[in-house]
Amino acid sequence: MSADVELNNVSVTFGSFYAAKSVNVKINGGEFFSFLGPSGCGKTTLLRAISGFQDPSEGSVLIDNKDMSGIGPNKRPTSLIFQNLALFPLMSVSENIAFSLEVRGVSKGDRQKRADELLELIALEGQGEKKVHQLSGGQKQRVAIARALAVEPKVLLLDEPLSALDLKLRQRMRTELREIQKRVNITFIYITHDQGEALTMSDRIAVMNEGEIEQIGPCDEVYNNPLTPFVATFVGENNPLFGKVKETNQNKIKIETPDGDFVSTMNENKKLNIGDEAIAFVRPESLFIPRDGDSFDNLIDVDIESFEFEGNIKNFYATLKSGTKIKFSIPNAIDTSSISAGTKLQLGFESTKSSILPKAQLAID
Amino acid sequence: MGNYLFTQPFFKKNGKAVAIYFLVAIVFWFVFLVIIPQLYMLDLSFRSNVPPLARGGPQDYYTMEHYQHFVFGSKTSLDAFNFVDLGVFGRTILVSIMVTIANLLFCYPIAFYIAKIANPSTARLLIVSLIIPFWINELLRSFALRILFANEGVINNFLTGIGIIDQSILFITYDIGLYTGLVYAYILLMMFPLYNAIESLDINQIEAAKDLGSSSLRTHWRIVIPHAKPGIVSGCTMVFMLTVGALATPVVLSSPNTLWFPQLIYQWFNMNDNWSRGSAYSIILLIISVIFVLAMMRIFKVKIGEIIK
């Protein structure tokens, strides 16, 4: 059983500070939804508003179309997985998992049965008698998930639960979380500052900045068509090229910068007029070294400064005519041994792979 | 010998001067303040009561008479047992246990409030308010309570003044003043171990329990109290030991017809000039305190190391 979660105009204030400001979002039942943003952007506050630990100063939280105001965290159909997991150290693994059943007065035998089922779900059969501190980081993680699922919540809330794990384990847990979500088929709401986590697991993400949602959409849409310079630079990497709008028509927009004119395909929401200050964004992986016969909508002259080898790709750092620095990445499969510091090159990128947005704050500032 | 000593890791790590200072301080404390007085008292409790000049003479011999006196009373008594002293002893222990429990029940909510609910400035204010009264000597605090609880005291005057009662309540006669005084006397020794233990609990543990559907009461029972157990045991043992050995508060606040066990000990030492019997009674009190600590550790399944933390 999954449930819709709806935030209607939710604001949370601490004194005069807005931790969350007029947030509107509708999360569908069974969806894996992530709030993505830098620390202090208000995402944890929103999660606490959904779980019931924080009352919204304005607006309402609806779960399953029911207004949750005045309903405490112990009465909501949600389960929260804490950043530090908050497993109970003095209880065994089984007791931890069955705690929510214990407080509901379920008999000991039934509790044990349910705990065993959940231990099987998280591949920890037969380890119920262990104490929490005897488990590894990844196992603790899974126990926290099992404990949260034991109540059969309609919505599972996850507050950066992977941040304490090392890289390999984190990557494995991403897949595992996604699989668990498919199996139990309930709504997952995930909080993270790690865009890799958000993009790999989520059906949709909401990018947050300073208490407000900047963009909501499927991962590829947010990545390919960012609506604000903040989203463009926070989700993935992006090279900003500052300039002024030179031409617009129905489906193309042209910007004039000190390093040349660039065109981008126009999408809705961008209300730009000729003469407005704007930024053209192009991602490192969308910049190519043209080969014979290639033609690109945009061309740009660069001066290589340095490069680094990352394994699957090679990153190049270069300067433009105006002094602006940009980064581009070439797959390791392509031979780039002739390029080194001091090499002058012309790079190309497609108008469909570039976004031109009104000038505003960047995430990398 | 000296050379051998100074090459030990302890000396190398701390430097000669500091190491010697540490050693002297620790040895002095342990030998002169802990071992010798206790052994001397243990020895004295098994000796006949003779004036200092007769020590080592023919009248100075080892005997069980002081312990026998505690149980059976004086040889001239007609009673089979020393009902008076045993009664005082039993009552002292029983009341001390009640005082310890009352103290725990009283301190737990306050400690929890200060540690987990109050904002930092309120918490500081509350802690200071707890400490300030203890800048005043224990004896004076007892007298203050006596003034409050006296038959013509502040509380009685107030209650009669507003007409709730028309006759003074005999707080002192019924030892209500004494119980209150004893609970209050060592409240900090319950409060701070409890506060420290609760304070160290991750707030997420409480929220996690709540999120999993636990009521407030159950969260305390299953999460907070088990975590605070070492603090509870530590507070209870300290309060019990000090209460059972309290002298100033009972002297000032107990009713004329009740005695507290340390008052008996005091009488043997100072009024009856029988140090041996006083020592025997003190040893009995010590044994009871040790038994209480062991019982607490057994009941709450904590180790001595956890309590001392």
Image: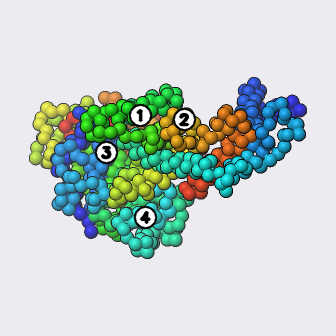
Which structural element holds mark 3?
Answer: loop
Observer able to see residue B200: no
Instruction: Measure the C-alpha gap from mark 1 to mark 2.
Output: 15 Å
Instruction: Measure the C-alpha gap from mark 3 to mark 4.
Output: 31 Å
Q: Which residue is mark 1?
A: B150
What is the x, y in percent for residue A70? 22, 52
**Mark seen at residue B102:** none
Number of other residues with Cα within 10 Å of mark 3, as a class: few under 14, some 14 to 19, many 20 or more = many
- The kind of residue tagged 3 is Gly
What is the x, y in percent for residue B188? 49, 37
Number of other residues with Cα within 10 Å of mark 2, as a class: few under 14, some 14 to 19, many 20 or more = some
Instruction: Measure the C-alpha gap from mark 1 to mark 3.
Output: 66 Å
Select label 4 or label 2 by which is in front. Answer: 2
Residue at mark 4 shares a chain with residue at mark 1: no
Residue A152 location, quadrant: bottom left
Asked if residue B261 lies left or right of residue A247, the reply is right
Q: Which residue is mark 2?
A: B251
